[in-house]
Amino acid sequence: MEPNLKTTGFIKGAAICVVMLALVMGYSIKQPSAQSADNAIPDLAGTWDGGFRARPVNGPRVPWGDENFPVLNERAVAYQQAWEEIVAPKYDCQPASSPAIQYDPYHMEVTQWPDRVLFRYEKDDQLRTVWLDGREPSSVDFGIQGFSVGHYENSELVVTTTHFVFDVAGFDDYNGIPSSSQKLVTERYWRDGEDLRVTLTVADPMFLREPTSYTTRWVPARAGYKLAPYDCDPEAARASVRFFPSKYK
Amino acid sequence: MSIRRWIAAAAAAGLVVMIAPVIAHHASAPFYDSTKRVDVEGAVTRFVFRNPHAFLYLDVTGANGQTTEWQVELGAPVGLRRTGWTPDTLPVGMVVKVSGQPSRAEGSQGICCVRMTRADDSPIIDGGRVQEEQPTR
């Protein structure tokens, strides 16, 4: 029986289509997840202004207001009662830590590399590295800024930071709230139009009864803005301390 | 005076006395009393133009003829530089007028959050503004 040429052609055509479709689907599945809609890499790179143009400057009730002021345990309250402004190590040029450094009213620069995201803060010349390559911290990775790992998720950069050292003003120096080596800070960065936004959540069972969060933003720095060296000077940092009327003699 | 001259005069006045919005925070409150005001005029003896805050030291002669030192807290040089300030902006011997919040500690002579001009009331920086500084911490 002679084969039906039309049927044979149809079958061949269909087979080719199936193969091509399978190839396309297989190719799509094998693409890096960063290219999919869920895990698209947001463009966070640039120089950002976190000063007065973007938000209220930090203070006793900023960013911690009635809605999100941390619920302190007795240990934290005891520290707070002993606290005086001049205890803050910033008066000896010690940089701010998370969750305060993100709210300092200065500029920062974000650089995105395949294996890491770099946050460079103009205040105190701080550089935070967020590792995207799956590495884990070791026992020598404790520090003021801790150890940060991250990944992209839902067009956001999700950063988790651990390995902080104890800091007597590590949560907030205005209110005298310390933080411990158990501090865990999670940040989610995303673009909102021209702005860069973050929602930051901090947990620290040594001092806080429950985690607390704030959301804030940066606006693009003015054209041509370059971060300048800060070079904190201990004499200048401490010059106003003698004006503080201490309750301790 | 023609309208054009009025406009020019108003613009010039704006350059000389432009009070910036008071920024609502309390970073300086532990050290300085925002409910009080002090005015001094004196000669620069030292200008420390370093982060986190620049400090200016003045010799001020009081009504009793005695000269004492006052310490004036200014903003962060990292920001001041962008408005034209340098370590040479306030040379030793330059006379300035300073108005601001007095320091809290008993017997201390500090001023913060100041409005500062040259002795003739002109801006410190040529073409600059006269405004209250509110250093952030």
Image (cartoon, coloured by chain):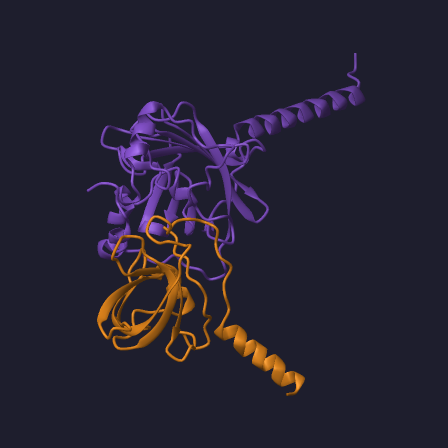
**Residue A106, percent across and down?**
41, 52
- Chain shown in orange: B
Q: Look at the image and tell me in which quarter the N terminus of chain A lies.
A: top right
Left or right of residue A137, residue A33 in this image: right
Residue placed at 28% from the left, 54% from the top?
A: A240
Residue placed at 37% from the left, 48% from the top?
A: A120
Q: Quadrant of residue A209?
A: top left
Left or right of residue B52, residue A52 in this image: right
Residue placed at 51% from the left, 59% from the top?
A: B21
- Chain shown in purple: A
Question: Furthest residue to the bottom?
Answer: B1
Q: Quadrant of residue A36?
A: top right
In this rendering, the answer to whether A100 lies above or below B119 is above
Depth order, front residue of A164/A167: A167
In this rendering, the answer to whether A118 lies above or below A187 is below
Residue placed at 39% from the left, 53% from the top?
A: B136
**Residue B81, percent across and down?**
37, 65
Whether residue A136 is visible, yes or no, is no
In this rendering, the answer to whether B48 lies above or below A187 is below
Question: Furthest residue to the left?
Answer: A249
Left or right of residue A158, residue B110 in this image: left
Left or right of residue A239, residue A210 in this image: right
Depth order, front residue of A123/B37: B37
In this rendering, the answer to whether A236 lies above or below A101 is below
Total numbered badges shown on the rendered structure: 0
Q: Look at the image and tell me in which quarter the C terminus of chain A lies.
A: top left
**Residue B105, percent across and down?**
27, 52
Depth order, front residue of A243/A124: A243
